[in-house]
Amino acid sequence: MIEAVAPCRADLAGGTLDIWPLGLLHTGSVTVSAALAVHVVLRVDRTGPRGRVVHVVAGGEPRQLEADDATTDLTAAVVFALRPRAGVRVEVVTQPPIGSGLGGSSAYGVALARAVAELGSGTLDDRSTVALVRDLEARVLGVPTGTQDHWAALRGGAMALHAEPGGDRFEELPADVEWLRPRMTVFYTGISHHSGMVNWEVMRRRLDRDADTTRAFGEIAEAAAECREAFVAGDADGVAAAIRDEWSARKRLAPEVCPPELERLERLARDAGATAFKACGAGGGGSVVVWHEPDLGPTVCAALERTTPQGRVLARGIETEGCTVRSVETGADEDRS
């Protein structure tokens, strides 16, 4: 049996620009993200029936997937791409809330691809893993997908993903865990959202050269570059300012990005002392990243929890370790990246 663990992510600035070719339309585009201690944990073995994959949802009944499901189901897509004869059983041990906006499906795809490759005594390098899972997600979802989620799941820590001709360039950012933990909180709002369709609508308008959308993406790109610079410099106020500017521009992309209930939470967080607030992913709900002074985190979170019964803190600070894969068949403890 192979166990794979991959972290999810919070995008601080520049999300959506990692979807090809949006970033290339704004020279110097960068997406700044941080991996979180919110994980996808899978266990994969060869006990599935030959020619099928059995996908066990956490706490649910097993369901069998055929090769024909590979165009509509990510589990089937990844497994059959790497093991055409399948015969694999997949158990979901842990995963983030559905619709959390933390790139959970991409982290799932990364963890599954690495586990299935390891099960077959094969290897997948990082770029191959990113390309495979990204393309399979796009096929299953029917819309373009980005790559920031996959890189965060693979590498962990904080990163800047530069959109450049010839392919994205990954940059590991210096991440002082003790500096970040008291300043950055990721809060799950419980508000459902649909990131794929929101991203596609704003992407379509940008490709159609809609003036307002183009200006908003330009401001998002500028804010993301400023966020990266402030992050490298350890400038907490600069990071907060960049997140505020990014969110202000992002809200102009579509009304669905910040519905009234999310706007209300933003006001509550700011009133409680948050210096910046933005939705993760495409917005609309899911999770939010809140930036605050070190001593105000508990106050801000308490204000959100009092008014959001279904909400809860998911993570503080970042996860420095990326995807790990290990054999648990014989109780082996050695991790393989």
Image (tube, rainbow, N blue to C red):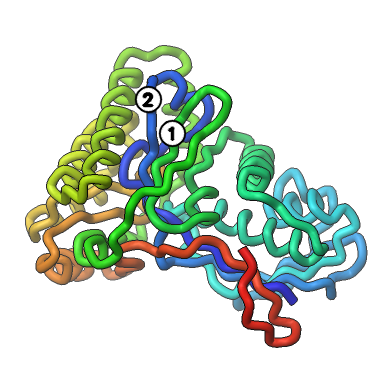
235 vs 219: above or below:
below
Front residue of this view, candidates 327 and 301: 327
Q: Is residue 228 left or right of residue 264?
A: right
Instruction: Give percent across and percent down for residue 81.
Output: 79, 49
Q: Give the residue type that dot 2 points to.
A: Gly
302 vs 26: above or below:
below
Q: Quadrant of the C terminus?
A: bottom right
The quadrant where residue 274 appears:
bottom left
Q: Earlier in the sequence, mark 1 or mark 2?
A: 2
Q: Give the residue type that dot 1 points to.
A: His
151 vs 26: above or below:
below
Front residue of this view, candidates 51 and 222: 222
* Residue at image coords 58%, 66%: 324
Cα distance between the residues tagged 1 and 2: 7 Å
| Tag 1 near tag 2, CB within 8 Å | yes
Quick check: can you spot residue 140? no
* Residue at image coords 74%, 86%: 330
Q: Is residue 112 left or right of residue 95?
A: right
Name the residue that disc number 2 marks: 28
Kindly identify which numbered label has been placed on residue 162. 1
Q: Quadrant of the N terminus?
A: bottom right
